[in-house]
Image (cartoon, helix red, strand yellow):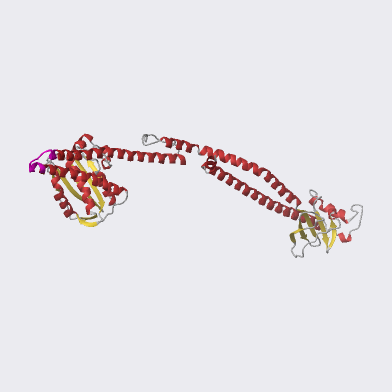
Amino acid sequence: MLGKIKLIFTSTRFKVSLWYSSLFFLMEILLGLTVYVTLNNLSHRNLDSNLKTQARAILRVIEEKHVDLESFKPGPVYKSEDEVIWDIAYDAIVFNRRNTFIVVAQQNRDVFKTANLGKKTLSFPERKEKEILFDYRDKDLSTSTIRVCRLSGKRYVVTVAYPKEFISQTLNDLITIYIIIAPIFLIISIIGGALISSKSLARIDTIIKKTEEITAQNLNEKIPGDEYNDEFGRLVNKMNEMIGRIKTSVDFMNQFSISAAHELKTPLTILRGEIEIALKSEKAPEYYRSVLKSNYEETLRLIKIVDNLFFISKSDNSLLSVNKQEIDLYNFLNSLIHSLSILGSEKNMLLVMDPMPALTAWFDENLMKQALSNIVENAFKFGEENSTVKLKVEKNENEIIICVSNRGERIPPEETEKIFERFYRTDKSVTNKIGGVGLGLSVVKSIANLHNGRVGVSSGEDSITTISIIIPEK
């Protein structure tokens, strides 16, 4: 039970839902704060603008009508000074008359103030500006802060004030609404996050299920979903490519196991048979000499197979070091011809070198000798009897090209690139008779890569096959 609970809390679905909900909740808080601050600022700016407008309107009307309150005398139209001011200021305060405080002063004497002020008056700081805005607090007038605008004219000073209670009430209402809807939105975000994560990760379950079904026995199968061009589709595509590489490796290993077992079994069987016959009875010295010679040849064959396997293993694990030196190609190839010519004696084949200019190149002499030996040995194996194997060197810009050509059965165009793959053999019937596990040219390619070079092959209708090693001059 505890394991299942732990699995839930450590699952990607839970983490995605948690992150989604947290992000949504954070955005909700930021949105609420933004609305609160924006509304607060707008309300205060609008209040200041309205107070200025009212003060300017009252002062303008008083001064335009040239009202002289000092010499005022009651008459049939206006019975008191208050009636005069109310008549003048009516348009300015008609829409918020109940809550607006207005004071009109002349020579530091209040000549008019609204009834909601009672015996109070609005005091203000001593400042010389013609128009000022400031906050004023008087608990008898309002429980909240009062915003005041004072405007000085030629003869009168008009003061208009309004309590900020409506702003505070609006903001409090906003907070109340937010407190109510915030938990609702949070619950919705949690549910939405769970649904989204479940929907978006559903394909992961399919991938996991299919991956569990794929074993070494069914590597031909693929994980569905690589047709989608999204993250999951690309993941599936890469996983299918990985499975393909694993299948190739397994096929290589299987092919190697069969080929190596066959190739190792043949010389070992020959060795065993010849030794058993030699031990059964006394033989002439010449017979023992021929047995030893045959055993020696089979031993060399075994060593060649093991050496190639050992080289590939070191190459795969980056255990090979390349000791490049400047090598005179003419002397190097002459020495190679001298040591390898004997391989063609069985089929009466010659190893010759085309005329070449004096050239030098930088490479590891031992590794390059091994690569060219493998190519020449293949040329002798698959070449026609009584034919010639040619070595040729060319220079192309900053590259040195060493070619080995022989006359023999043509390699099909679709197989020219495959011959450098491990354990690959073109005509199985021919290679089974000749021998080999298909490692020689793979070793050649590895050596060329170690020299930052490449290999090439051409096999034309004239039955001439040429295998090349292309390496940088320096």
Disc tally is 0
Question: Residue 89's spot in the image, x, y percent?
Answer: 81, 53
Question: Residue 314's spot in the image, x, y percent?
Answer: 29, 49
Image point (18%, 39%), residue name: 272
Q: Give the residues in magenta.
A: 277-288
Horizontal arrangement in the rendering, residue 447 relative to residue 143 (left or right): left
Q: Quadrant of the N terminus?
A: top right
Q: Quadrant of the C terminus?
A: bottom left
Q: Name the residue nearer the viewer: 191 or 468.
A: 191
Per the image, is 279 magenta?
yes
Image point (41%, 41%), residue name: 238
Q: Quadrant of residue 149?
A: bottom right
Image point (23%, 44%), residue name: 305
Per the image, is 252 magenta?
no
Residue 455 visible within the image: no
Residue 45 visible within the image: yes
Q: Quadrant of residue 270?
A: top left
Image point (18%, 48%), residue name: 392
Question: Residue 178's spot in the image, x, y percent?
Answer: 67, 45
Horizontal arrangement in the rendering, residue 411 relative to residue 12 (left or right): left
Question: Residue 216's spot in the image, x, y percent?
Answer: 36, 36
Q: Name the residue nearer the viewer: 118 or 382.
A: 382
Magenta segment main secondary structure: helix
Horizontal arrangement in the rendering, residue 269 relative to residue 11 (left or right): left
Seen as rendered, the residue at the extreme front is 281
Q: Name the residue nearer the viewer: 344 or 316.
A: 316
